[in-house]
Image: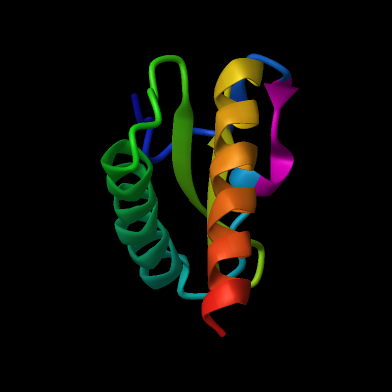
């Protein structure tokens, strides 16, 4: 379900940003936070019934050391998440 981490070598080719490190930038803290959030997002999506088969949640660090969560979904799953998001947004607007 989730591929938290990564080495910079994806199916699309080399991601140079994943391999370049700048002295003095704390990449680990950003990655740790992103890893926690990726797991939290995966748990939340599963809790609302989203099938994460074929989905990929990946924690990485940006060039400035901040955490980034990458979410790759099959088309059908992305459509399901879009519908759930619209339903939730409608409910929140009505409640507010």
- Residue 16 in the magenta stretch? The answer is yes
- Residue 96 in the magenta stretch? The answer is no
In-front residue for pair 40/28: 40
Q: Vertical placement of 10 versus 93: above or below?
A: above
- At horizontal 64% and vertical 40% (from top left) the residue drawn is 82
Percent across and percent down for residue 95 are: 51, 78
Q: Quadrant of residue 64?
A: bottom right
Query: Which corner quadrant holds the N terminus?
Result: top left
Percent across and percent down for residue 85 are: 58, 50
Query: Which corner quadrant holds the C terminus?
Result: bottom right
Q: Vertical placement of 52 versus 94: above or below?
A: above
Percent across and percent down for residue 68 are: 55, 58
Percent across and percent down for residue 50 are: 40, 31
Q: Vertical placement of 63 versus 76: above or below?
A: below
Q: Is residue 56 left or right of residue 43?
A: right
- At horizontal 55% and vertical 71% (from top left) the residue drawn is 92
- At horizontal 38% and vertical 42% (from top left) the residue drawn is 45
Which stretch appears magenta? 13-17
Q: Is residue 1 left or right of residue 89?
A: left
- At horizontal 72% and vertical 19% (from top left) the residue drawn is 13
In-front residue for pair 53/61: 53
In-front residue for pair 85/40: 85
């Amino acid at each position: 379900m989730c591929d938290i981490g990564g080495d910079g070598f994806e199916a699309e080719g080399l991601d140079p940003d994943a391999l370049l490190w700048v002295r003095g930038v704390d990449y680990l803290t950003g990655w740790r936070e992103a890893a926690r959030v990726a797991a939290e997002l995966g748990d939340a999506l599963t809790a609302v019934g989203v099938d994460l088969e074929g989905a990929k949640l990946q924690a990485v660090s940006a060039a400035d050391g901040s955490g980034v969560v990458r979410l790759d979904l099959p088309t059908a799953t992305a459509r399901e998440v879009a519908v759930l998001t619209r339903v939730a947004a409608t409910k929140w607007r009505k409640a507010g």
